[in-house]
Image: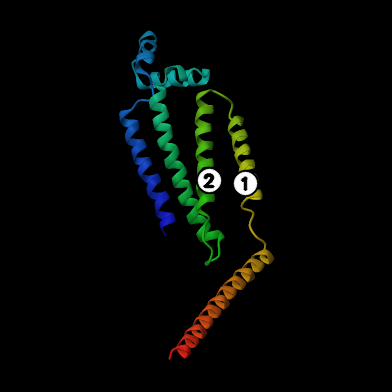
Amino acid sequence: MRKYIVPFSLGLIFLILGVYLLRILSPLNAEVLGPLISAQKITTDAEFLALLDELVSKGIIWDYLDLRNVAIIAGIFFVAVSSLFAAAHLTLARVFFLKFYEQPHLIAAIRRGVEFGVFLLSAVVIRLYGLEIYYWGLVGVLLICLEYLIWKTVEKPLSDEEREQKTLFQLSVVRFRGTLRDLRASASRTIRRKSSADLP
């Protein structure tokens, strides 16, 4: 149960922290953006949003961002999204894809949560650079290929025959350990009886 609660709680805490920081830390650099607002005589929210859209479309919004605040906010939301995705992954895997005696793979869920966070972060960066949307798809394809490569080389699921052989091997190990334990106990009793017989 802990493996479900920990990532969900962590994601929720970082999500709340990220929303709070968005209220007190501006991602925009007021010292640089202020003169531009004054020069274009922007007075309404609609005009300000139109200006931001123009800066994004030209790919020069980065010149008007406070990179320190952006890095802090992005890092916190990255942890929040990755953790919440991992929690959702664990829950869905347990409910829909695994048998009742199987446990979801925590490391795989965390890794895929990180990959999902990287995808969303890349999407934001690509958008702020004013690049075309197909770059998002390129990042997604690269991440899917990476995940497939890891799954294929490290975590490829066992077939029914391999799983049965693994179960038989584990049972053999358990029985072997039990046999060794019985032999030790028998030898110990024999030694104690012999020692008692040798006593005057």
Whether residue 142 is situated above or below residue 185 in the rendered picture: above
Local crowd size for mark 1, using a 10 Å CA cut-off: few (<14), some (14–19), many (≥20)? few
Q: Residue at left 38%, top 8%? A: 39
On the picture, is 159 further left or further right than 12? right
For label 2, the residue is 111
Quadrant in which the C terminus appears: bottom left
Picture coordinates of residue 90 (x, y %)?
Answer: 49, 54
Query: Which of the labelled discs sits on residue 150, or is there none?
Result: 1
Picture coordinates of residue 103 (x, y %)?
Answer: 51, 61
Quick check: marks 1 and 2 in contact, CB under 8 Å? yes
Query: Which of the labelled discs sits on residue 43, or is there none?
Result: none
- The residue closer to the viewer here, 15 or 167, is 167
Q: Mark 2 is on which residue type?
A: Arg
Whether residue 73 is situated above or below residue 175 in the rendered picture: above
Nearer-N-terminus badge (1/2): 2
Q: Residue at left 52%, top 19%? A: 59
Picture coordinates of residue 13 (x, y %)?
Answer: 35, 44
Q: How far apart are marks 1 and 2 (CA)?
A: 10 Å
Element at badge 1? helix
On the picture, is 157 further left or further right than 102? right
